[in-house]
């Protein structure tokens, strides 16, 4: 079990919780420091949790940065006839996410896309056309139609390889750390995987780097440099890799109920605290969803179908601010791709179906973006794919909805096959993302550099279909 941040299972003292719920973060931080100072015999998990909590408070405040005035102005660019009454109504209805912080109403920095998904009225009144979204959807649909059609005629697993050439850059803002200090940077890098069999590093800037082993659970390219006056703190990596779509026809009658791979079964049906947790609520939920079903493939299908039917897609605060992501998803019935993937993995594991994490980027060349999904294991077919967030988006079209249970498109860049794994070399301070790694991580001797101290950019330089073929890949 990976015990990274396991201390999040320790619930905060009630007095601290009440202050945080009221947005009285300064008082909460003072109380935490008082508890740590006056109690030398705190349980180790609680002590670690309290030591982390002041950092978590600072991160929560960064998720809720917009004043109501700025949020209103931002929304008015999309809805020109917006009134203050509209804005207030949508806040009261919960469509505009907000919380009180030190007596002031603060709006969630990513409120806009959530509002336009949650409120039909707001969606109807939008005057700006999202042409990029339409283009990416068209390209994906054309690809899925091809894969589904060809895959149905193949007796074995059908794959369609694509070769991508990608560049990624990370820039640290001026004066982020004192001059003369050593800056340490980790950038995500594609790992070797059955879906992604060929990976080649082309260049890095600076040239000196450490590339993690190709089978690293969270693979990175690492840089280290001294900060000097007028020196640009910019890091670049360019690489090419082959990734293949995968379509596998599964006959549920051929799925074995017993697993011969005992090590795989035990590892991927275990808890992985704090986010893959077999809480009483999640156990009961899994029982309710799976019912009397005993076929592992059909158990996973019931879980996928429930999530895509009940958990709405929504942007969420940073993962590092959420105590237990799978429980968060099941309580709020909303969440982004990683939140939904972790709920799928957790419910599968509780139900005795091995499941694991994959993430990196959704590499549609028109508009690439960070993305997470899952895998589940059934014999004799091996590891299959499940992407409940994209599957949920496509539930209105049955063939697309079913595709994302068992299969995967070729718009993928895999950097991670586990959550919260150690980097190469190990990071000394808290990570900005304590779960995933898609944007990168930066630190110096004085501590971690959070996202407000640097920027990142990924660009698809080329995207070329190589050929179509059928092969067995497990």
Image (tube, grey):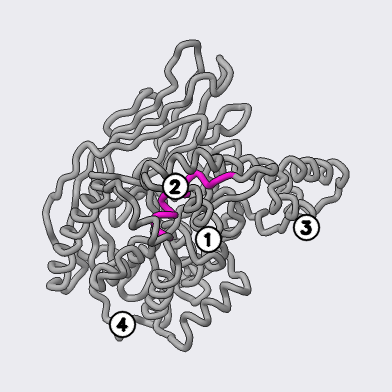
Q: Is residue 445 left or right of residue 375?
A: right
Q: Nearer the viewer, mark 1 or mark 3?
A: 1
Q: In this view, does 320 lie above or below 342?
A: above
Residue where numbered disc 4 is placed? 252
Q: Nearer the viewer, mark 2 or mark 3?
A: 3
Q: Main secondary structure of the magenta part?
A: helix
Q: Which of marks 1 and 4 is in front?
A: 1
Real-space CA distance between mark 1 and mark 3, rounded to the nearest whole angstrom: 28 Å
Whether residue 248 is visible to the viewer of this picture, yes or no, is no
- Callout 2 environment at 10 Å: few (<14), some (14 to 19), or many (20+)? many
Real-space CA distance between mark 4 and mark 2, rounded to the nearest whole angstrom: 32 Å
Residue where numbered disc 2 is placed? 218
Tell me the number on the disc at residue 384. none
Q: Which of marks 1 and 4 is nearer the N terminus?
A: 1
Q: What element carries label 2?
A: loop
Q: Is residue 375 left or right of residue 105?
A: left
Q: Earlier in the sequence, mark 4 or mark 3?
A: 3
**What residue is drawn where x is 36% and y is 66%?**
392
- Which part of the image, by quadrant, shows the N terminus? bottom right
Residue where numbered disc 3 is placed? 14
Q: Which of marks 1 and 3 is nearer the N terminus?
A: 3
Q: Which of 69 and 349 is in front in this view?
A: 69
Q: What percent of the width, then of the height, locates residue 56? A: 64, 45
Real-space CA distance between mark 4 and mark 3, rounded to the nearest whole angstrom: 48 Å
Q: Nearer the viewer, mark 1 or mark 2?
A: 1
> Hey, which residue is sitting farthest bottom in the picture?
292
Q: Is mark 4 on a helix, strand or loop?
A: helix
**What residue is drawn where x is 56% and y is 15%?**
179
Whether residue 118 is visible to the viewer of this picture, yes or no, is yes
Tell me the number on the disc at residue 93. 1
Q: Which of marks 4 and 2 is nearer the N terminus?
A: 2
- Callout 3 environment at 10 Å: few (<14), some (14 to 19), or many (20+)? few
């Amino acid at each position: 079990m990976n015990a990274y941040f396991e201390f999040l299972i320790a619930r905060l003292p009630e007095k601290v919780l009440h202050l945080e719920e009221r947005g009285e973060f300064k008082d909460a931080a003072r109380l935490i420091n008082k508890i740590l100072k006056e109690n030398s015999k705190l349980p180790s998990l609680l002590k670690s949790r309290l030591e982390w909590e002041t950092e978590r408070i600072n991160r929560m405040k960064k998720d809720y940065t917009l004043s109501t005035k700025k949020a209103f102005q931002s929304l008015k660019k999309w809805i020109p006839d917006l009134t203050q009454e509209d804005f207030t109504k949508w806040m009261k209805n919960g469509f505009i996410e907000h919380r009180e912080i030190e007596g002031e109403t603060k709006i969630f920095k990513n409120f806009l896309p959530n509002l336009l998904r949650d409120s039909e009225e707001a969606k109807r009144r939008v005057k700006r056309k999202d042409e990029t979204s339409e283009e990416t959807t068209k390209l994906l649909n054309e690809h899925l139609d091809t894969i589904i059609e060809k895959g149905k005629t193949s007796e074995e697993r059908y794959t369609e390889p694509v070769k991508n050439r990608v560049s990624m850059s990370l820039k640290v803002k001026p004066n982020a750390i004192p001059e003369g200090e050593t800056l340490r940077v980790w950038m995500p890098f594609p790992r070797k995987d059955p879906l992604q069999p060929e990976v080649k590093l082309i260049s890095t800037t600076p040239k000196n780097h450490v590339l993690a082993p190709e089978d690293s659970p969270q693979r990175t390219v690492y840089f280290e440099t001294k900060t000097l006056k007028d020196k640009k703190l910019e890091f670049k990596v360019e690489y090419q890799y082959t990734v293949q779509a995968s379509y596998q026809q599964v006959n549920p009658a051929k799925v074995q109920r017993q697993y011969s791979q005992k090590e795989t079964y035990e590892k991927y049906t275990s808890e992985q605290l704090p986010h893959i947790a077999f809480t009483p609520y999640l156990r009961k939920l899994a029982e309710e969803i799976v019912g009397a079903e005993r076929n592992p493939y059909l158990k996973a299908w019931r879980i996928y179908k429930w999530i895509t039917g009940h958990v709405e897609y929504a942007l969420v605060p940073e993962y590092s601010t959420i105590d237990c992501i799978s429980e968060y998803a099941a309580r709020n019935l909303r969440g982004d791709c990683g939140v939904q993937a972790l709920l799928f993995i957790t419910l599968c594991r509780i139900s005795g179906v091995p499941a694991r994490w994959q993430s990196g980027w959704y590499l549609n060349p028109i508009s690439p973006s960070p993305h997470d999904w899952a895998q589940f294991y059934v014999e004799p077919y091996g590891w299959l794919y499940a992407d409940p967030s994209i599957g949920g988006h496509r539930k209105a079209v049955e063939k697309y909805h079913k595709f994302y249970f068992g299969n995967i498109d070729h718009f993928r860049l895999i950097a991670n096959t586990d959550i919260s794994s150690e980097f190469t070399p190990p990071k000394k301070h808290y990570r900005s993302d304590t779960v995933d790694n898609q944007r990168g991580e930066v630190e110096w001797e004085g501590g971690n550099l959070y996202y407000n101290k640097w920027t990142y950019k990924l660009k698809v330089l080329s995207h070329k279909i190589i050929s179509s073929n059928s092969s067995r890949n497990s």
